[in-house]
Amino acid sequence: MYVWELILQFFHDMRRRKLRTTLALFGIAWGTISVVLLLALGNAFHATSSKAFHGMGESIVIVWTGRTTKPFEGMQPGRNINMKSSDVLAMGAAVPEIDLCSPELTYGGRTLSFDDHRVKATVAGAVPAYEIMRNMIPEPGGRFIDRLDIENRRRVIFIGNELKQKLFGEDEAVGQTILVDSRPFTVIGTLKKKVQNSNYSGPDSDRAVIPYTTFISIWGNWNVSNFLVTPNPPQASAPMIKAIYRYLGQKYRFDPDDEGALGTWDTVEMESFTDWFFWGLKALFGLGGALTLGAGGIGVANIMFLIVRERTREIGVRMAVGARDGHIMGQVLLEALMIVGIGGLLGFSFSALVIFLIQVAPMPDWLGKPELSMSVNLVTVGILSLVGLTAGIFPARRASQLDPVRALEF
């Protein structure tokens, strides 16, 4: 009954101050919209960017050979380090810090043709583990290269989705024979479309992959363009890189600390940095929205101070008949929280509508699809609660500390 009376009193006070109440509600609603939309968009952008980054591969390190820059065991600097595919596979078996390993032989500008369609593309020679390492997921009905393809040097080819479109259009590609520099290859799979914002020799959608043994049988036993490794355990890329330098330094006689002998692209470390960057960006977004919400809280506090002032005599009467300080504070706090709650509900409703419109509207892939996730809701409710308590606590304390005698004389 007491709470119901407080609620009725609240709406009575709000009707008396329509303009102030409307402005306060607008400030809280606008702040809520800012928090929800900024956090939702930040989460969507983070998720999409992470997915696009993983399009090149998850937890991989790309290594390429270079030239020594330090003298070592009587050897002069300036020596080229050259590796064959067999050397890479032997290293993968010998270094326990390596989980998966694949050499990569690449030959750019090859002519791929089917009927009267001809395109230029890069052809890569790799092993079956390349599928997992580089997220080369085939479309249903197709497959990636396997162990038997490697052992038998089969002329089979896995093509990117853009290559498939250029050569076959909407027709089925799997099972068809295409020519690679006039040599026949059977298409065994096409790449499932993926988002990829990083690459080192062109996007996977425009590349083709064949067994590395087939590559060697056609174009010769080249030095590897680069090789790919994943750490064991996952995320432990730094110890793995050091182990690779030690192993290859001993095999090719170069200083294990010579960073010129090998070049590395550690996507594990880059992913960690990117995650921290986006967490910081989302925190900045949340702070911006919270400040906007805080400005709305100032309006709520002003209304509550005005209400306390106008009710000074009423508060004095209640205190004179035995009302406790906690009851006085509770009434003011409840009214402040109700203003914030109504404004927050309006803000949530409008934000949900905007997010729905973004989801159904054609938007750039890099933006992602924002949604009202549990984390966004919890953070917003937490900020709203803090704003409501802060906006109400000072007027409430002022009301509870009034001198009953002076209040009755007001």
Image (cartoon, rainbow, N blue to C red):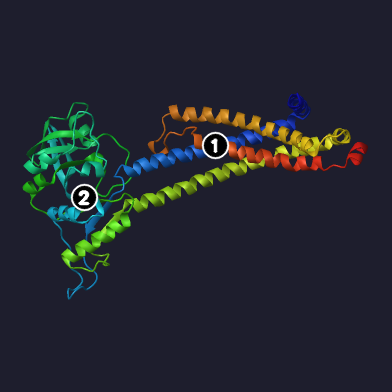
321 over 245 or under it: above or below:
above
Q: Residue furthest bottom?
A: 74
Q: Which mark is residue 378?
A: 1
Relative to residue 187, is residue 14 drawn left or right? right
User: Decide: marks 1, 2 in contact (CB < 8 A)?
Assistant: no
Quarter in which the C terminus is drawn: top right
Residue 27 in the image: state x and y as whole percent. 65, 36
Closer to the chain start, of discs 1 and 2, is 2
Q: Residues within 10 Å of mark 2 (few under 14, many from 20)?
A: many
The picture quadrant where one finds residue 240 is bottom left
Residue 192: image location, x then y, percent:
26, 34
| Above or below: residue 205 compared with residue 8 | below
For residue 90, which quarter of the picture?
Answer: bottom left
Between residue 114 and residue 72, name the one nearer to us: 72
Q: What's the CA distance linking mark 1 and mark 2?
A: 43 Å
Q: How far from the left and from the top, in percent, is residue 32?
A: 59, 36
Disc 1 element? helix
Q: Amino acid at mark 1?
A: Leu
Q: Residues within 10 Å of mark 1 (few under 14, many from 20)?
A: few
Residue 160, quarter of picture: top left
Q: Taking the image as drawn, is residue 225 in sight?
A: no
Q: Quarter holding the N terminus?
A: top right
Residue situated in front as seen by the camera: 308 or 199? 308
Which residue is under mark 2? Answer: 101
Camera-side residue of 197 and 276: 276
Q: Position of residue 109 (x, y in %)?
A: 16, 46
